[in-house]
Image: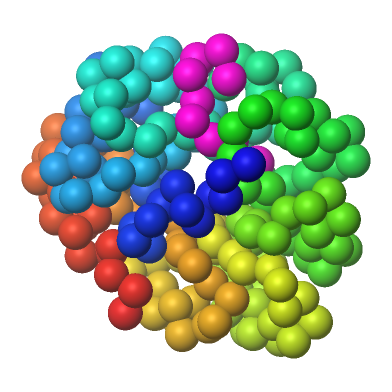
Amino acid sequence: MTSFSSLMGNQTLLPIIQADNAEQGVAIAKAMSDAGLKLVEVVLRTEASLAALSAIKAALPDLVVGAGTVTNETILQQAIDAGADFIITPAISDKLLAKLATCGVPVLPGVSNTGEILMAREYGYQELKLFPAALAGGAKFLSSISSIFQDISFCPTGGVTAENKADYFALSNVFAVGGTWVAQKDWVVSENWQAITDACIAANQPT
């Protein structure tokens, strides 16, 4: 199975798209693509999310488009049926991990503590999402566990900002960061797509 980090390539930002309708999702994704990004995550938090994911894949076929906020088998299957290139979860359970193992696309499981990190590793995962990163201990937590879980690397999301992302990239066990700050709600509402492009360009730098 392809690793999640290999999907990202040189991209260090996991940009998150939350769309109220398919057209809005496509516009956000295009703004991110215009910044040179090759991969985006559509979070399944609105009724239009699945339609947005499919529309983005149709409109921007070269973009790698995955589904986030996958919490159970039903949502997982809906995401796969919508064409998700990868799956991201906010949390894990034995039941969900067992289903993820057979979903056929790369997965980035979400964890928030050492027990969940160990569980995910027992299922073979070496790349994990720390969520919600700020509340789960942030960069200090990741630094403190780096010697315990030497084979695990992380993409923290949740409370990651332009101001603190450098704290995460200073760590050897962080391969990317994710966040919504690059597609702020007021920019989307006002259709300020250039602001999203500019923010993505600035954010997709490790330091």
Q: Position of residue 143 (x, y in %)?
A: 64, 85
Which residue: 28% across, 63% down?
203
Label tally: 0
Residue at 58 percent of width and 20 percent of height = 80
At 85% from the left and 42% from the top, the residue drawn is 93
Please provide the residue range marked out in magenta.
80-89
Q: Is residue 82 magenta?
A: yes
Which quadrant would residue 100 be assigned to in this image?
top right
Q: Left of 130 or right of it: where is 64?
A: left
Q: Is residue 190 left or right of residue 110?
A: left
Viewer-proximal residue among 184 and 138: 138
Q: Is 68 above or below relative to 84?
A: below
Relative vertical location of residue 55 with respect to residue 39 in this rendering, above or below = above
Q: Position of residue 102 (x, y in %)?
A: 75, 28
Left or right side of 109 for 68: left
Residue 9's x, y, as percent?
A: 38, 56
Q: Is residue 116 visible?
A: no
